[in-house]
Structures are given as C-alpha cells and as structure tokens.
Image: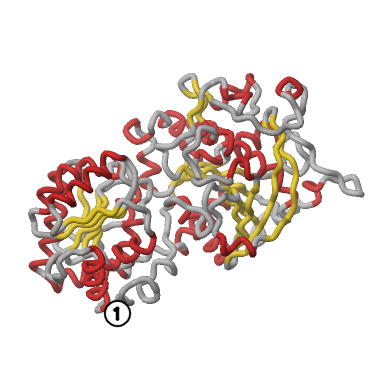
Amino acid sequence: MPVKKQTTTKTPAAAKTAKHVKPAAKTAEGKTNAAVQTTRAPSGVGKKVLYVGSEAFPFAGTGGLGEVLGSLPRAINDGGRYEAAVILPLYGSFPENRRKDLEFVCWTFVQLSWRRQYCGLFKIKEGNTVFYFVDNEYYFKRDRLYGYDDDGERFAFFSLAVLELLPRLGFFPNILHCNDWQTALVPIYYNLFYRYKVEGYGNIKTVFTIHNIEYQGWFKRDALGWVFGIPDDEFGSIEHFGEINLMKGAIDYSDAVGTVSPTYAKEILTGEYGRTLDGDLVRNAHKLRGILNGIDTVTYDPTSNPVLYANYSADDPSGKAECKAGLQKILGLPKDPRVPIIAMITRLADHKGLDIVRDALPQILARGVQFVILGTGDGYYERYFTDMQNAFNDRMRAIIAFDKTLSHRIYSGADIFLMPSRSEPCGLSQMMACRYGTIPVVRETGGLADSIVDAYNGDFGNGYRFSRYAADDLIAAVDRAVGLYRDYPDKFKGLIDRAMRSDFGWDASAKEYAAFYDDVLR
C-alpha cells in the first residue's frame, strides 16, 4: 500500500513509542469530556444511534448506501424510540449551495499510525436529523468519493476520527451503526483501543451492516501497522487468506451484523454468495439479521416530483402517458403509446445481470419494444450498449451517464423495468419503479425476492420474477410482461395500480431496526 508524503509532527521511528489513542481532555473537575457526555437511558426513549458511513444523500452519494443513510435515520427519528444522527466525511463535492449552512463544532488532531493529522468537525441539520462531517482536505477534497490508491488510509483516518470525536459531538451514542468496509475499522478500533482503555467508552454497542459483500476492504499484510496502526499481535483479528480483510474483522468484532434484506442474509451464508466470508458469517450467524431497505417516498413521489413531464397517482394514473410521450421525445424515439418501453437504470457490471441481458437483448428488441438503459461502469458494457444503439437506432437508447433527473423521467415514462441481477443485496430501483407504476421484471435473489411478488397471469402481485440465471428465463419473463401489456391492457392497468400501492416506505423498516437495536442493547 503506497503512502503519500504528508505533514506530520512525528517521524515513523518516533511513532513506535507514541500512544495510538490520545486521551480525552480533562475538565476543571478532573473528568474527561467523554465521561461527562456519556449519560444514557438504559431503555426506552432517549437511546441514541450514530450512523457512520462513507456517503449519505443529499450531501454525498453514489448509490444505495447513500440513499439508506439519507433516509433511515430520519425514519428512526420519526419513530421516537431512538434518536439518530449521521457522521460522514466532508468531501470536496459537498453541495456548494449548502456550505453556508455548515456549523463549525471543533477541531483536533488524530494520530493514525505515524501520521498526526488535522481533523475538523462540522454539522448541519437536515429535517429532523443532524449530520456531522469530518473535515480533512488531504484525504477528502477530491473529485470522487472512492477509487484512490490510498482509500484504505483515507477511511482508516475517518474511522479513527469518528471515535476520537465522540465526546465532542454533544451526541454520545448507545449504538455505533457502521456501514460497509469503509467503516469496518470503527468496531475494530473501538475494541482494540477504546472500549477498555478510554474512560466513558465502555458501554457502546457496535452494529455493522453489509450493504454489498462484493466489496470487503482487502489490503496487503504489510499495511497492518504502517497504514492502519494496528499492532502485529492483532493481525489474526483481521487476517483472511494471509491478507487483511476489514469486513471480516468487523463481522467478528461487532456486537451485531446486519444486511439489507432477509433473503440476502441467508444467501451470504453460502459459498455461492458469501465471497469467501461465508464461513465467518456462519460462525457469527447468531448475530446476523436481514432487514429490507425502504426508499425515500418523498423524493420518489409521482404526485409531486417537479422534474416529471406530468404528475400522477395510483388514483389518477393518466399523467403517466404524458411522461411516456415526453420520454420518447427527449430520447428521440418514435412517439407511439402502443409500443412498450423497457428500461434499465443500473451500474454497468456483470453482477447486475448484464451478461444475460447482452445475450437476450437481440431477441427482446425483436419483440417490437423500445429499450433504454442509463448508467456507467465497465467499459465493455458501455461500448456494447452504445453499439446496440447504433445498430437499432429506431428502438434502442444507451445513455452512458449518471443523471438523477433523467432517471426520474425514465422511471415515470417506461412501462417495464428490467433488473435481472445475479446478486442483489436489496435493490432500490425495483421499489422506485413500482412507486412510478413501472412494472419490474426481476430475478429471484436478495431483496428482489423479498420485494416483488410475481403477477402470474396479471391478477395479483406487483411484478414478474424468474429464478434461473439464464437469458432464456429472462426472455420468458419479459414476454409475460409484454404480453400482458399488449393483450390484456385492463389487467396491466390493475398491475400498475398494485405496484404503485406497494408500501416501500421506511416506517416498517425503521420499526424493525428499533427492535434490532433493542436486542443488541439487551
């Protein structure tokens, strides 16, 4: 792991004798700040959860994790049983129009291995939720959130900073709820350096949620001390096949482990889906729970969304036809209400099912449909779908971009939404499609299996499912959806109605999380 040169008050040699964690400052009464601010209610209202994540909408986000941390804490606060806040890095991409709302809280230094780095703390109130931001321009003032050679060091700093800043937040949590590998070091650092060694930190519980087990935080063995500041005798705690695996360490060290759907919680216990961590998860199965995500029903609301070509509802869906016409116009597709539009909004990657979409697409287009795909990712798929657009210009559009406004217009204007993932921890797009009355066709995996009920002949359910990961099965499911659209329009309208009335809000999930937290604290 390469380490960039940076300003530090200690040389690597001097750091060998330095304490890894700086004690909290003492008050005039001789008590530490941590001890002063750790009063907790043992049960009932007044318990606190601090969500620790690398992204949260509307301040920073690239996908599902940002959606969850932008919505779940608000729903938890609405529930009243727990008080929730969020902490994340202050990225260079923080919305410029919101910078004036940032409130400075404090600053300190954080000692990560041999580096002693500045750390600022800001906060902002968004609705009923306080968001805290860890500031360090060296690590976070960059063009992207992820994808740098020193990502391990960046998020090690962030994880350590969160623990150092707890006494200064004015919000000392009963539970630290960490998310994905970027925050996996929080429960690791907490158990190694804080739980038993820093006054006032002893009773915090840690929850670690796996949003996608594909990304685990793998690093070379020699990064242990130099990058992460962990002693050699603790290597076994995070060792996996001779290397460092941060997610494995978080699974072992956390008090509870969550994931984002009940089916995915079962799948990752198997070799097919566990991505080498199935054995560790089986060993920790007693603390594993899957809770289905929700979506932000305010942001994804066809009755009021201002970027749609027309607003509509389950009670009056007539505006959806205008949304379809507007989508065909902006994409330069023939304007024909009789032709079903099939859409995908996805990261262009194999596990999203794009290999079977590639094999099935010529036959799907031969059904006389229009097809639109929006997303970025693997260069091979970017080129493939662009080539298909050139070959089928009268019925195919590939928009290689990340465009939130266009995504809303596609959700509202399409008739059928394709999501044939090989693996899908939860998936939010199928829920968003339902919200807009666009019928999902999904593979039975993870959260797709937990959220979509097969319509069979159109008399019930909210979408279509297939189980075998194969192009033939995908085509058969698409044929069922297209057949109902063309041959039984009244049944298709009934399917739209049921899809739009599916309850994918956060209220039910927030209640499950509150019960989960109760179990953790017990």
Query: Observer-nearest residue: 184 or 195?
Result: 184
Residue positioned 34% across, 30% down in the render? 271
Q: Give the image location of residue 21, x and y in percent.
A: 74, 34
Query: Observer-nearest residue: 521 or 159?
Result: 159
Q: Which image quarter is the N terminus in?
A: top right
Residue positioned 62% across, 64% down in the render? 125
Residue positioned 35% across, 39% down in the render? 267
**Where is 432 relative to 201, above or below?**
below
- Residue bearing mark 1: 315
Q: Quadrant of residue 471?
A: top left
**Where is 215 relative to 314, above or below?**
above
Residue positioned 24% across, 43% down in the render? 383
Relative to 300, 316 lies left or right: left
Q: Quadrant of residue 381?
A: top left
Relative to 357, 270 lies left or right: right
Crowd around label 1: few <14 · some 14–19 · many ≥20 (10 Å): few
Q: Secondary structure at mark 1?
A: loop
Relative to 46, 302 lies left or right: left
Relative to 45, 378 lies left or right: left
Query: Observer-nearest residue: 88 or 24?
Result: 88
Say whether residue 322 is visible.
yes
Q: Give the image location of residue 206, x and y in percent.
A: 60, 43
